[in-house]
Image (cartoon, helix red, strand yellow):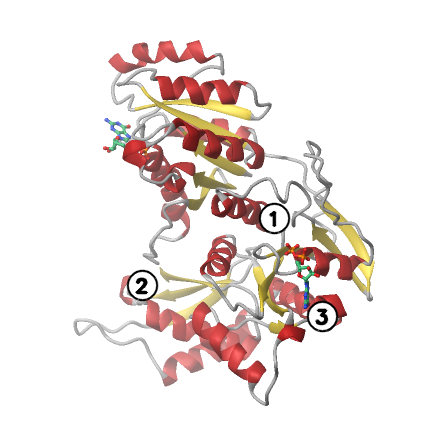
Amino acid sequence: MIVAIVGRPNVGKSTLFNRLTESKQAIVDETSGVTRDRLYGKSEWIGKEFSVIDTGGYIRNSDDVFEEEIRKQVDIAMEEADLILFVVDVVSGITDLDEAVAEILRKSKKNILVVVNKVDNNQRILDSNIFYKFGLGDPICISSINGSGTGELLDKIVSYMDTQKIEEELDIPKYTVVGRPNVGKSSLINALIGEERNIVTPISGTTRDSIYTRYNKFDHDFYLIDTAGIRKKGKVTENLEFYSVLRSIRSLEQADVCLLLIDATQGMESQDLNIIKIKKKNKKGLVILVNKWDLIEKETNTSKDYTAAIKDKIKPFVDVPIIFTSVINKQRIHKVLEEAKIVYENRKKKITTSKLNEVMLEAISSYGPPSIKGKFVKIKYITQLNTFYPSFVFFCNLPQYVKEPYKRYLENKLRENFGFTGSPIQIYMRKK
Ligand code: GDP
Ligand code: GDP
């Protein structure tokens, strides 16, 4: 589920965003210290996970915002998000810009929550009543700064979550095709499923094409999550980044493995790296397709050099299949499906505890964690968690002293020994 935070500047959108996405980090990952992205994050509440996007981050020059610009963000959010948090400020009350946003939201059929922020004390709860005026339902009072009310807000948010799961118990991989415009996504999908299904029509569709479609092609059974360019291709030219981020999140959320296409004539660009970041946050598998390979003049080392250049850009996550395709010539389509299946299997892989300890304790004894301030870290025992992607807990005496470089060493050893190509790996250090 994608939750979009909208509202005019200074109402507290980014403060709320931080609070919602921190809640997850606090629970899941207190040791890693990775910096959070300002615009997109995951949130977790009572075991349910959802994506949060702060539309404010996409508005340029936020001190001096034009209504038009906010309007566009709200429009896109309305179309692509599942739930909208309309944030307003109890201190300043209702402004013209709030009215403008409310007017757009009233026309939408999406679920909307009016979130009254800066309700730092009880006095201000009374003041929040004016927001009934929007006609968008009961206002929810919160203080993003001190956290009050956010529990109720989270309860409300997860109550909207889609309970319909597709046949999860079936062991069939779900793939999604992502990439910048014109890299060949539709062509790939057509090549995969062998019919002109992904035709771009000028009709501004309101019905979303069925998200999952199951195929049995080339001896492979898989679901394709079909979001690439079906609708409104030409329509959204402005705000393209915001739009494509939302699109990528949507398709990635549902997939097991992401097939990222890049254009061989252009190489890996920042938007591609953004997709990889989103993929990482969602703990999905990855296969990189360097498409339009037919357009490249090849010499002996061309593909090698290409591979090296890509790996350099996606460091430190380099253990990923890279395939050179020409989808219009149907070149290596088979290979793509094969690799995607392997990544899918790798992401589900479970290592027995005895094997894990045998191999990893050996690796640790040959190169141990560096001592810090004269203290030595002793890792005693390793276990794999029962999560939907590979995560490992290393039990030790001083977990806080194990830093990123050493965790990377452990990750590399896991990859070398057990084969997790294309899959993310999470490492936790814990006190026994
Ligand atoms: P945005 O422009 O909507 O993303 O707003 P920010 O999150 O940047 O917040 C704008 C200002 O409001 C900042 O100075 C925040 O510290 C402040 N602020 C945010 N939430 C609260 C709150 O719950 N109570 C109070 N008193 N101030 C808040
Ligand atoms: P999308 O926007 O990512 O869905 O890209 P399309 O599938 O619509 O492809 C964009 C253009 O690139 C079309 O003109 C395709 O014919 C062309 N194209 C796609 N794949 C290849 C390829 O492997 N080689 C070459 N030369 N052109 C390709």
Label 3 crowd bin: few (<14), some (14–19), many (20+), radius 10 Å:
some
**Callout 1 touching callout 2 (CB < 8 Å):** no
Label 2 crowd bin: few (<14), some (14–19), many (20+), radius 10 Å:
some
**Residue 240 place in picture, x, y as percent:** 51, 46
Residue located 53% across and 39% down the image:
2
Q: Secondary structure at mark 2?
A: helix
Which amino acid type is shown beneath numbered disc 2?
A: Pro
Q: Which residue is mark 1?
A: 251
The C terminus lies in which quarter of the figure?
A: bottom left
Label 1 crowd bin: few (<14), some (14–19), many (20+), radius 10 Å:
many
Residue located 75% across and 70% down the image:
329
Q: Nearer the viewer, mark 2 or mark 3?
A: 3
Q: Which mark is residue 212?
A: none
Which mark sits nearer the N-terminus, 2 or 3? 3
Q: Secondary structure at mark 3?
A: helix
Q: Secondary structure at mark 1?
A: helix
Which amino acid type is shown beneath numbered disc 3?
A: Glu
Q: Which residue is mark 3?
A: 338
Q: Quadrant of ligand 1?
A: top left
How much space separates mark 1 and mark 2, taking CA atoms? 36 Å
How much space separates mark 2 and mark 3, taking CA atoms? 39 Å
**Residue 404 place in picture, x, y as percent:** 34, 67
The N terminus lies in which quarter of the figure?
A: top right
Q: Is residue 212 above or below residue 301?
A: above
Using the rendered image of the protein, determine whether residue 145 is visible from the camera's viewpoint.
Answer: yes
Which amino acid type is shown beneath numbered disc 1?
A: Ser
Which mark sits nearer the N-terminus, 1 or 3? 1
